[in-house]
Amino acid sequence: MKAIIFGPPGSGKGTYASRLQMKLDIDTVSTGDIFRQIMKTDSPLGKKVKTYVEGGLLVPDDIVIDIIKKRLSEIPLGKGFILDGFPRTLEQAKALEKVAYIDVVLLLLVPDWIIIERLSSRRICRDCGAVYNVRYLKPKVDMVCDKCGGTLYQRSDDTSEVIKRRIEVYEEQTQPIMEHFKGKKIPFVVSNCEALDTPPEIVVEQMLKELRKLKLA
Ligand code: AP5
């Protein structure tokens, strides 16, 4: 299965993609994770990327497209993948079409109030990148990763001002590319989130049920 998981900031893309990866033995490619790794380096590219990410703005297309092409070329032929956070502009969507055929779009519909609530309480493992929530998906030990024992931290773009900007950028620049996918007749699996306390496992099971109908799981 070659899929795009698509939705606003904090809609659960990373949370669901990591669970689907384990269940389906596929790869996940998260441009956000790639940029956070690049930002850790003191390189000119790291500094440049940081100004966009911390401002809640999109990293320029030329940088994103170069990085994703390289990352996709590393996936073994025939292995499935989920793209998390890519494409985010029409130019990125067109660049993707030149290098990969997409079977399905996993669309997450989540109201703004849930996004704001989830992002302000999100924590990430500094070592393995696992995602937690201090209110809704707590680690067993406070601020310690269940998977690797790493320390949890709050992302620098999870402040209320930057969250607001990211939602605006999604609505203005990213959401419109949905029409492009629809025009390409790519099947959609839609998850409609209306409550804060639906466990991710339930959402993932519903996705898998729909993917089985499409013979993709
Ligand atoms: P990116 O990292 O992709 O950020 P995002 O799209 O804003 O999405 P998030 O990672 O914030 O959220 P998510 O949907 O993965 O939700 P999560 O699973 O964590 O990108 C960051 C930045 O990089 C961008 O702003 C941009 O600057 C740049 N960038 C990246 N890609 C780019 C591109 N293609 N082009 C240009 N620039 C790009 O879940 C959120 C929280 O909710 C967590 O705490 C989680 O535990 C909790 N949660 C989720 N689901 C549930 C549930 N069912 N029950 C309880 N809690 C839940």
Image: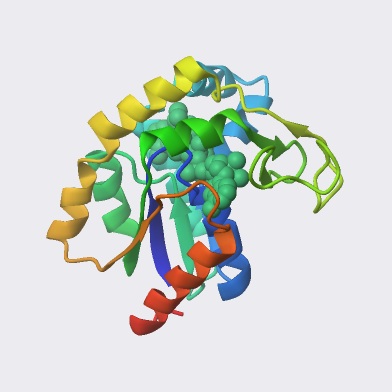
Quadrant in the picture for residue 164: top left
Q: Is residue 10 visible?
A: yes
Give the residue displayed 28% in from the left and 38% down from the top.
Answer: 174
Quadrant including the N terminus: bottom left
Image coordinates of residue 189 in percent, x first then y, are 33, 65
Please name whichever residue, 191 or 215, is drawn nearer the observer in this view of the structure: 191
Whether residue 90 sits left or right of residue 206 in the image: it is: left
Reply above or below: 190 against 136: below
Please name whichever residue, 83 or 16, is drawn nearer the observer in this view of the structure: 16
Give the residue displayed 32% in from the left and 27% down from the top.
Answer: 169
Whether residue 77 sits left or right of residue 19 in the image: it is: left
Image coordinates of residue 202 in percent, x first then y, are 53, 66
Give the residue displayed 48% in from the left and 39% down from the top.
Answer: 10
Image coordinates of residue 150 in percent, x first then y, are 83, 41
Reply above or below: 172 against 192: above
Please name whichever residue, 134 or 40, is drawn nearer the observer in this view of the structure: 134
Please name whichever residue, 135 or 165, is drawn nearer the observer in this view of the structure: 135
Reply above or below: 15 against 57: below
Image coordinates of residue 51 in percent, x first then y, are 50, 16
Quadrant in the picture for residue 89: top left
Whether residue 144 sits left or right of residue 99 in the image: it is: right
